[in-house]
């Protein structure tokens, strides 16, 4: 099954994350199909970037979105992933 999830990057105590499309059976740092964006929680304001058109493409193709990515999309982009599934 294809999933959209966070991939942890960075060093100890200074993490940042990539939003990636990968196979569910792959390791957290394993090979990815596509990188959709990033999330950096460090600093006063969190940095968030996402290619929304590719996210909608993958969701409409049947990819499952993790709870963490769903929360970030609702928080920063204010778009509904339910409409992409239809």
Image (tube, grey):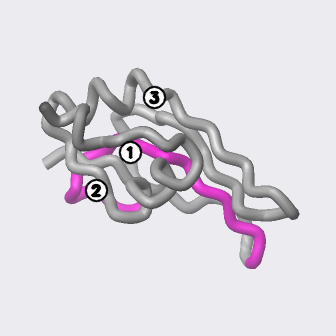
Query: Does residue 24 belong to the magenta stretch?
Result: yes
Measured in 3D between alpha carbons, the distance from the residue under mark 1 to the one under mark 3, in whole angstroms, is 21 Å
Which mark, residue 4?
none
Crowd rating for badge 1 (residues with CA inside 10 Å; few <14, some 14–19, many 20+): few
Q: Earlier in the sequence, mark 2 or mark 3?
A: 2
Horizontal and vertical percent position of residue 40: 70, 55
Q: Earlier in the sequence, mark 1 or mark 2?
A: 2
| Quadrant hosting residue 67 | bottom left
Horizontal and vertical percent position of residue 32: 38, 41
At x 16%, y 29%, the residue is 61
Q: Earlier in the sequence, mark 1 or mark 3?
A: 1
- Of badges 1 and 3, nearer the viewer stands 3
| Dot 3: element | helix
Crowd rating for badge 2 (residues with CA inside 10 Å; few <14, some 14–19, many 20+): few
Measured in 3D between alpha carbons, the distance from the residue under mark 1 to the one under mark 2, in whole angstroms, is 7 Å
Choose between 9 and 55: the one closer to the eye.
55
Question: In the rendered image, which residue does mark 2 sit on?
Answer: 26
Question: In the rendered image, which residue does mark 3 sit on?
Answer: 52
Horizontal and vertical percent position of residue 79: 43, 39
Count of marks overlaid on the render: 3
2 and 3 marks in contact (CB < 8 Å)? no
| Dot 2: element | loop
Which mark, residue 31?
1
Which stretch did the figure color magenta?
A: 13-29
Horizontal and vertical percent position of residue 34: 40, 32
At x 30%, y 42%, the residue is 81
């Amino acid at each position: 099954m294809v999933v959209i999830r966070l991939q942890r990057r960075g060093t100890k105590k200074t993490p940042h994350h990539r939003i990636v499309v990968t196979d569910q059976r792959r390791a957290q740092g394993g090979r990815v199909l596509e990188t959709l964006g990033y999330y950096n929680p460090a600093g006063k304001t969190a940095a968030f970037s996402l290619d929304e058109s590719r996210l909608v493409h993958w969701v409409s193709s049947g990819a499952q979105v993790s709870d963490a990515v769903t929360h970030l999309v609702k928080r920063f982009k204010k778009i509904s992933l339910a409409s992409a599934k239809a």
